[in-house]
Image: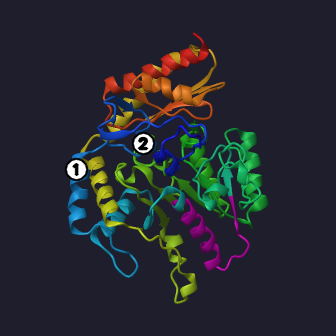
Amino acid sequence: MTENKSAEIRHLWRPYTQMQTVPEPLCAVATQGARIKLDDGRELVDGVSSWWTACHGYNHPHILNAMEKQLAAMPHVMLGGLTHAPAETLAKRLANLLPGDLNHVFFIDSGSVAVDVAMKMALQYWINNGVKGRTKFLCFANGYHGDTIGAMSVCDPDEGMHSLFKGLLPEQLITPIPETAEQRQAFEQLLQDNKDVLAGVFIEPLVQGAGGMKIHSAETLRYLCETVQKAGILFIADEIMTGFGRTGRMFACEEAGITPDIICLGKALTGGAITLAATVATTDIFNSFLSDDPEKALMHGPTFMGNPLACAAANASLDLFENEPRLEQVARIENRLKQALEPCRAIKGVIDVRVKGAIAAVQVESLKDNDRLKARFIEQGVWLRPYGDIVYTAPPFIISDAELDKITGAMITVLKELAGM
């Protein structure tokens, strides 16, 4: 760390950051709706919903009131040997919302761990059923599933951010998402060749988030689920980013009409108010762990799993999906994003413009200096974090038309500057 960095920055190790060269961070002091207030008085329109979590915007009174009430009564109690109403209620509500018989909810405190638990469930499912050797997972190019050791292993090892750890992580099978007839034939052959070692297949349904906001069709998702399950392999949907309305349905899997064997949830589960995640399994998966043999139990238990304060926030968030027009707001955002960003196709260096639900990404040949781009967006009054080869937005669902126009206007302005236009 260079000498000109403050003591606070030296103590606080920031995410995805080269601490030697990173510019000084902005200091946020308050949030409200779709805006972040800085200590210097400026306000930024948040175009990324604090890593895609703040779907209802910030500081929604219904969520805050629910958390304040729970905080006064019982902020936390362990789930080992105890239970409590917020977790019981939330598990039942999620089971009722999710497709098919995804009825059994295991709470965790982060999305990456939700993926690790899904891996553990899938591996032990086969062991509990007396099937040996199913120790591998198949996942897709440009996929991203988190930063813990297990989750890293099912990310794209070359295009993702974990290439340094290649050789240290469990080696999984990686293949492109099969769109063409030729790719699908190869995919089916891959399943056939590895059916005796594959425990499951991981997918980010409809949109691959950190891999570049790459979109595949509902028909492709349905094909993948049906083909994998027909081959006798577990299909695992990572809806940590796509869940809770982001793609236009409550869950992306709904658009394809599928029921995965296991689904991972997180991020917007609490409306962005506090950390909570869940791994939800079908009855078949759950029943495979029922036995008089204690070794067949799922031996996993995060200390803060089912935290009452977080469950109260999540229940309040689900109330808002029931009582406020969130999915209609997503449809409005999608239409406005498509219209506003279409002119980007004429900007030099732009490769593609992709929109799905409340997600839009403009892919370019090269972003060059990301820190400078972020600074330019701040100067435009918006909070955006371009990465890889995309400038993207995933705003809160309650964002106003004027705020959304400010985001898309800034994207066009900065992209034109990048192109030298």
Residue 201: image quadrant is bottom right
Q: What residue is drawn where x is 56% and y is 48%?
A: 204
Residue 360 seen in the current view: no
How far across and down, in percent of the image, does residue 402 sit? 32, 23
Helix, strand, or loop for circle 1?
A: helix
Q: Which of disc 1 and disc 2 is earlier in sequence? A: 2
Q: What residue is disc 1 on?
A: 62
Q: What residue is disc 2 on?
A: 50
Q: In this view, does 179 lie to the left or right of 29?
A: right
How far across and down, in percent of the image, does residue 47 sit? 42, 33
Amino acid type at image mark 1: His
Pick the front one: 235 or 76: 76
Q: In this view, does 302 lie to the left or right of 399?
A: right
Tell me if residue 377 comes above or below residue 112 in the rendering.
above
Q: What residue is drawn where x is 52% and y is 74%?
A: 300
Residue 302 magenta-highlighted:
no
Where does the magenta region start and end?
114-137
Q: What residue is drawn where x is 34% and y is 31%?
A: 40
Residue 366: image quadrant is top right
Helix, strand, or loop for circle 2?
A: helix
Residue that extends furthest to the right in the rendered view of this protein? 193
Question: In the rendered view of the protein, which quadrant contains the C terminus?
Answer: top right
Amino acid type at image mark 2: Ser
Residue 281 seen in the current view: yes
Residue at mark 2 to residue at mark 1: CA–CA distance: 19 Å
